[in-house]
């Protein structure tokens, strides 16, 4: 097993583990934004940069995707690494100045503001980390959103910037968005959920027992299509919310227990 020395702390890790894995094992904090264990690590945001020492040579690397294959020495708190991470955060604050999540992370890093001009309203808030596109493609399997444009016009969008027919409104993109740019909006009048800012909508399913909102119709359809159970009772339970489902199961078990006596 290779060893990693991080800020003087020595830790043994499994071969192939990343510097970020090793740091978390030792309790050393490295800020991240585009990292999520559910998807591949693209190292897009560059917020997790640390200084790697190899003999007389030192270089900045991204901790979230740098694999540990041999004994290495890493500095998280070196002046060069701290300056690099602060510089990245200042650029991100210019890109998403209204994000409470980003401001909270910046405060933890000791960054109070940005010297850079803020972007235009139409470009604001998205930091282009790619987590939403990755989870949509790799986990959900829909690829309903992707990157569009180049340079300063680069953005995450649906094809032709129209509501996507591929979107099942599962909300995974909103869950992984680290700066709160993607939001789920419930439209009570139509019984739909909208994925903002992509404008994709889908009808919500309501519990047949209590009327509580559940998942969207296309999401439920996709889930049931992957279940190899041709059992009507199962499909009936799928139309209930988790709480009502538990009640039905408890009632059924109680009935079976009473019959056995």
Image: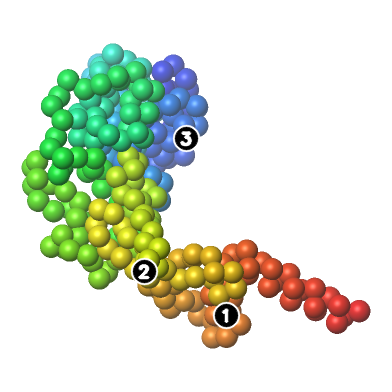
Single out the mark in the foreground, 1 or 3.
1
Q: Which of the 4 quarters of the picture holds residue 151? A: top left
Q: Residue at x 27, y 34 (%)?
A: 98
Vertical comparison of 196 with 240: above or below: above
Give me the C-alpha separation between circle 2 and circle 1.
Answer: 24 Å
Residue in the foreground of this view, choosing between 25 and 98: 98
- Residue that sits furthest to the front in the current view: 189
Residue 87 lies, in percent from the top left, at: 22, 23
Residue 27, labelled with which disc?
none
Q: Which residue is mark 3?
A: 13
Residue 19 lies, in percent from the top left, at: 38, 32
In the rendered structure, which disc, 2 or 1, sits on the residue that comes first in sequence?
Answer: 2
- Residue that sits furthest to the top in the current view: 79
In the displayed structure image, the side of residue 258 where residue 241 appears, left or right = left
Residue contact at pointers 2 and 1, CB within 8 angstroms: no
Secondary structure beneath dot 1 equals helix
Residue contact at pointers 2 and 3, CB within 8 angstroms: no
In the rendered structure, which disc, 1 or 3, sits on the residue that comes first in sequence?
Answer: 3
In the rendered structure, which disc, 2 or 3, sits on the residue that comes first in sequence?
Answer: 3
Residue 190, labelled with which disc?
2
Q: Residue at x 16, y 40 (%)?
A: 121
Could you classify mark 2 by the number of other residues whose Cα lies within 10 Å: few (under 14), some (14-19), or many (20 or more)? few
Q: Residue at x 40, y 73 (%)?
A: 217
Q: Which residue is mark 1?
A: 236
In the displayed structure image, the side of residue 93 where residue 178 appears, left or right = right
Q: Is residue 68 visible?
A: no
Q: Residue at x 54, y 86 (%)?
A: 230
Residue 231 lies, in percent from the top left, at: 58, 85
Single out the mark in the foreground, 2 or 3.
2
Vertical comparison of 227 with 101: above or below: below
Residue 125 lies, in percent from the top left, at: 24, 40
């Amino acid at each position: 097993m290779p060893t990693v020395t991080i800020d003087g702390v020595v830790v043994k890790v499994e071969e192939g583990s990343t510097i970020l894995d090793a740091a978390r094992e030792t309790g050393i904090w490295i800020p991240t934004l585009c990292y999520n264990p559910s998807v591949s690590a693209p190292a897009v945001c560059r917020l997790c940069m640390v200084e790697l020492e190899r003999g007389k040579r030192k270089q900045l690397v991204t901790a979230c995707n740098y694999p540990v294959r041999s004994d290495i020495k890493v500095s998280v708190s070196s002046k060069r690494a701290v300056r690099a991470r602060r510089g990245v955060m200042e650029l991100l604050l210019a890109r998403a100045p209204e994000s409470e999540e980003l401001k909270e992370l910046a405060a933890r890093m000791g960054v109070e503001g940005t010297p850079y001009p803020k972007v235009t309203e139409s470009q604001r808030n998205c930091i282009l980390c790619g987590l939403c596109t990755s989870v949509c493609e790799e986990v959900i399997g829909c690829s309903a959103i992707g990157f569009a444009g180049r340079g300063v016009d680069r953005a995450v969008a649906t094809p032709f910037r129209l509501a996507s027919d591929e979107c099942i409104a599962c909300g995974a993109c909103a869950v992984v968005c680290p700066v709160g740019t993607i939001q789920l909006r419930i439209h009570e009048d139509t019984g739909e959920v909208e994925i903002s800012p992509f404008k994709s909508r889908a009808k919500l399913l309501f519990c047949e027992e209590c009327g509580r909102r559940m998942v969207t119709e296309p999401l439920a359809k996709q889930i049931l299509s992957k279940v190899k159970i041709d059992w009507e009772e199962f499909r009936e339970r799928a139309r209930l919310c988790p709480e009502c489902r538990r009640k039905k199961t408890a009632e059924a078990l109680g009935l079976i227990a009473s019959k056995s006596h």
